[in-house]
Every structure is written in C-alpha cells, then in structure tokens.
Image (tube, rainbow, N blue to C red):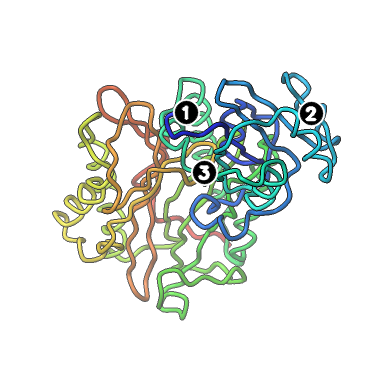
Amino acid sequence: MYVEDGLDGLFYASSANFQYLLNSTNYHWQRNSMNNIFGYSNYRNLPEAFLYLKANGDLHIFVVPALKDTFSSYPNLHIAYLDQFEDVLAPHFSGNKIGIGFGCFDFLKELVLEINPNLEVVDSEALLNDFRAIKDSDEIATLRKLALFTDEAIKHVVANLKIGLKQYQVENLVMDYGLKHGLADLAFTPTCGFKPQNSELALEALTFDRNTVLKENTAIAFDIGYLDEGYCSDWGRSIYYGKAPDLVKNGYLALQAGQKNMVDKIVPYQTNVNQLYDFVLEKVTELGYGDYLRFQDTKSLGHQIGIDCHEHPMLNKDVDAILKPGMVFCSEPKMFFKNEAYLRVEDMILVTENGAEFLTHFDRELFDIEVKD
C-alpha cells in the first residue's frame, strides 16, 4: 500500500482511517459530517489517540490514560500524557518519509519533526480511500441494518406529525428515536426542512428556519442519518403535509422514478460514478420534469458512505471512478418548486456483482400526509 509511495510509516489520529486500520467500533471519535471535504481547516486539534503504522507492518497505538481500557486488547499500546507523546514515540520511530492524516495534522507533524528535523512529511489522508470504498460482508451487514433502521425511524416521525409542531421539534423526534433504540449517535445534524406554501421560506431552496410552525400545505424535506457500530446512514425523502399540488406531487414521483432508473442502469466494473446523474436526468426529463432537477452544471448526485457519512469517490461530473461490487453510495437528487416545495430523495445503494440494490426501502409513493390537529 503505502510502501509503494515511498513512505516509511503512517500516522493517523482519531478519524475514520484510525478506525478502519484498527477495525475498532467501540471508540466513537467525534465526527463532523463534512470533515473529509472541509476538515483541513478545523480538525487540527490535539489528539487523545493516534496510531503509527510502520512500513514493516508493526502497529503502535498511543493514547491518553483515560483510554487505556478502550484499547487494552491491542498489542503495542502506549499510554502517555499529551506532553509525553514524543518521549514514548521516539524509541519506536524510524524512517525519513512519513504520511500523516488531516486529523491533528499540525500536532503530529510537529511531534515527528521534534524526533527527526530532516523528516519529509506527506499529507496521506486520501491514501486509504480506495480500500475503504469497497466494503466487506460485515460492513455491508452493518450498513444494511442501519439503513433499515433509518427507514423505520422516519415512519415513526411521519406518524407523529401534527399541526403546531416546530421544525426543531420534528428534528428532535429523529434524534430521540435513535437514542431510545440504543443507537450510538447521529451521523450529522438532522434536517426536517419546512417549506410552507407561498411563504418567504419557499422562495429559496435551502432556506429554513427551525422555529417554523407546521401547518397545512407545508412540504417537508428530510435529511437524516444515524451512527452505530462505527458506521453511518444517510437518508432523505420529502412529504407534503396536506393535499399536494399535482405539479409538486408528480415531480416527486418523477424524482423517485429517476432514482430507480439510475440504479437499474448500473453495470459493475463498467459504470462510472460520473454517469449516474445523467441516468436520473434521463428519466426525469422523459416525465417532463428535467428543468426542475438541481445541480445540472456540476452533475452532483451524492457520495460514498461508511465510517464517514461522506466518503470518496464523490458522485459528480469531475470524478472518474468505476463502480465495483461492495461499494455503498448515497444518491440524493433534488428538485425545487419556487413558492411550493423543495424535494429530495436520498437512498443508500449497494453495488453488487450483478448490478445494484437499494438498502433503503421507505415507501416511494408516500407523499401526501393527512393533516392532524
């Protein structure tokens, strides 16, 4: 792997790569759902745990005392306070070219340069992307279970909608359902975006106010995800609280049809991620709604998912990556009807040996929701 890049070793602090290399799911490091896209500017804090993987395969783990029991089953475990990490690392350190992930990058760089001032340091956050993109059977089983749980969660939320609830209260229903059922955390802050018909909020696609009160003729766009056993879900749908205008309802059904058309057209080892948007657009256009589909300039459709909510390769026109069995990605096409509704569909999708399958199965025809006082 990294030996081919001329690296003598790798350092990863608490992060998705840290978890992946340790195959550990009992240490829930603090995620930011966008950390692998924008994290380079905000994730360089002090580590409470990091690993050092040497070119010969030796793995060393360094943790603060509070985490000694969490990693007690691993060999080569070293316990130290933050200001002792250099002393504890130095006897085991060797090499002249080291790769470091973005988690606590500045701290780790300074640490290794204190040991060897002539060291070459390389940004190696993306080094494991190709490995992490292909999920094994255990990872797939975890993601499948989490996807189905997310389906059930939103059934519960929709069943409990009523006039007068504020947007943040509906979002709290999402969180409370997960915690009540023993899940570890949310994958990201949930959005249950209210768009009351002909309101100021309905003038722009992504404008929301969490204090908006639910009333009749309100479109709701859900974007939710849970975290459990070290992996994430990411899911989206829209519903209409009341009787939806035909334009909006048929647009939503077209969006669902586009999503299904995309999955049906996937051929493993042949389909490129930069083709997926066009498969959606093809069907949506056929049904008369092509002009409403968003992001036609970038053809942005989604992302892979796993330990991180947003993993690589991303799905857009600029990414060149062939879909292979074991990949799990989220496709999230969207439409916007000014003064009416912001619509989104997001599914977790597994690439198989013969094609692809949905891991999320929430009712694709459910849209109009009966109003309850």
Taking depth in this image into account, of 21 and 228 the one nearest to the observer is: 21
* Placement of 343 over or under 114, stated as above or below: below
| Amino acid type indicated by mark 3 | Glu
Q: Give the quarter of the image for residue 281.
A: bottom left
In this picture, residue 95 sits left or right of residue 3: right
> Which residue appears at 46% of the width and 26% of the height?
140
Count residues near mark 2 (Cα–Cα under 10 Å), then give few for <14, some for 14-19, many for 20+: some
Taking depth in this image into account, of 203 and 348 the one nearest to the observer is: 348
In the current view of this chain or complex, which residue is farthest to the front? 118
* Placement of 268 over or under 272, stated as above or below: above
Image coordinates of residue 114 in percent, x first then y, are: 72, 46
In this picture, residue 21 sits left or right of residue 359: right
- The Cα–Cα distance between marks 1 and 3, rounded to whole angstroms, is 15 Å
- At mark 1, the secondary structure is helix
**In the rendering, which numbered label is found on residue 3?**
1
* Placement of 219 over or under 347, stated as above or below: below
In this picture, residue 32 sits left or right of residue 36: right
- At mark 3, the secondary structure is helix
| The N terminus: image quadrant | top left
Image coordinates of residue 345 in percent, x first then y, are: 38, 51
Mark 2 sits on what residue?
78
User: Mark 1 touching mark 3, by CB under 8 A?
Assistant: no
Mark 3 sits on what residue?
125
* Placement of 283 over or under 363, stated as above or below: below
N-terminal of the pair, mark 2 or mark 1, is 1
- The Cα–Cα distance between marks 2 and 1, rounded to whole angstroms, is 24 Å
